[in-house]
Amino acid sequence: MDKVIAVARREFLATVRTKAFVLSVVMMPGLIVIGIFGGRAVERLALEEQRATRKVAVVDQAGDVLPHLSWQVEAYNQERPNQRFELEAVAAEADDARIEERLADRVRRGELYAYIFIAPEAVTGETGAVLARKDNQLQVGQRLESWIREAVIAARLARAQIDPRQIHELRERPIPVTGRDVATGAPVTENRMARALLPFAFMFLLFMGTFGIAQGLLTSLIEEKGSRIIEVLLSAVSPTQLLAGKVLGLAGVGFLLLGVWGAVGYLAAQKYQVAELVTGYRLTLAALYFVPGFLLIASLMAAIGSACNELKEAQSMVFPISLLTIIPMIFWFYLSEHPDAVFSIALSYVPPITPFVMILRICADPGTPLWQIVSTLVLMWIAVIVAIWAAGKVFRVGVLMYGKPPTLGELLRWVRYT
């Protein structure tokens, strides 16, 4: 056991002293801090930035939509006088295609920012409106579309002899909704963006702490094998002790990395007044899933690293594992929005992505059934035992073998060796 601890200490210190680890510890928290303070500053500067007036031509064939569109633009210009919009009324013609072609040409020449073509039956709902603009800015496009819809609705209300401005005033009156924690009963600050991104943040930290750190075991084994340092190490310890020490040492690195990033993330949550989302229950389960998740990934990486002589050879073997582990990244929004769906539950029982899927589900729904948590943890530890046993077999044979990389069949034969 003393030799295992000695190897683990050596692996831990050798990793944390590297520039890459120091940068990873400093860079990610630095990015979070920049996102906290810099994001709001940039947003404030963007709101205060002076921009040229955007001229929008409007063809109102319905006849009563433009006035309602105008007062919305006027209200916006009063709030943001440095980012104004200007409407230009264009008379309707018999040939719709001709007038749209002329307006599109003005947009291309830069005379107009956009043009809006409101069909005669837009108010009745039989047809709609056309919006064409020179760029693809998301917020500006959403704002213009919202103005068009509100103006058409206002015209419908006016035709029904209902004052649209009074309706608008009633709709704009604030309706404060106070969130309340069902467990403690304490009020919580509603931050939809933070609540939506919380599951992804937990999953990303877990992913970087497992797959990101475990890949270091792969590269270190290949480097030590190529430089023949591995032979010197094996003269002092057994292959099993060397493997166990390396895995334990990098597990400590993963815990250190998660601790630093998690602390900075908690400070960020406090800054945005959503610290109640980072509960002890979620943190505890994240740690419980991290341990078997890391051990499983690290065992697989150790087996691949011991069997290969070059990083290029190892990358082809790691690719299927990498492809599997990015599935939660691809479906994270679906998994967090539908934590109790059949697809989400099914993915929870697919090692090695079980920790990532489960932390997404738990952060999205703290009421995830306890039996699913227990059963997935049991499944992960069974997978860990099998992976460590198989990795030990491969490691014992492959760590001193050089030359052509083994095929999958050869790896399976190594596992069957007594």
Image (spheres, grey):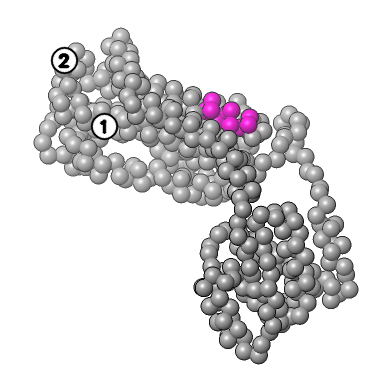
Please give the range of residues in magenta. Answer: 262-271
Residue depth check, mark 1 versus mark 2: number of the one nearer the observer: 1
Residue located farthest toward the top when viewing the structure as drawn? 2
136 left or right of 144?
Answer: left
- The residue carrying mark 1 is 219
The three-letter code of the residue at mark 2 reads Ser
Q: How many marks?
A: 2
Examine the rendering and report whether any part of residue 217 can be seen.
yes
Residue 235 disc label: 2
Residue 137 magenta-drawn? Answer: no
Q: Could you say where residue 130 lies in the image, as x and y percent from the top left?
A: 62, 74
Residue 123 disc label: none
Q: Could you say where residue 387 lies in the image, as x and y percent from the top left?
A: 33, 32
What residue is at 84 percent from the left and 64 percent from the top?
Answer: 165
What residue is at 70 percent from the left and 76 percent from the top?
Answer: 89
- Main SS, magenta residues: helix
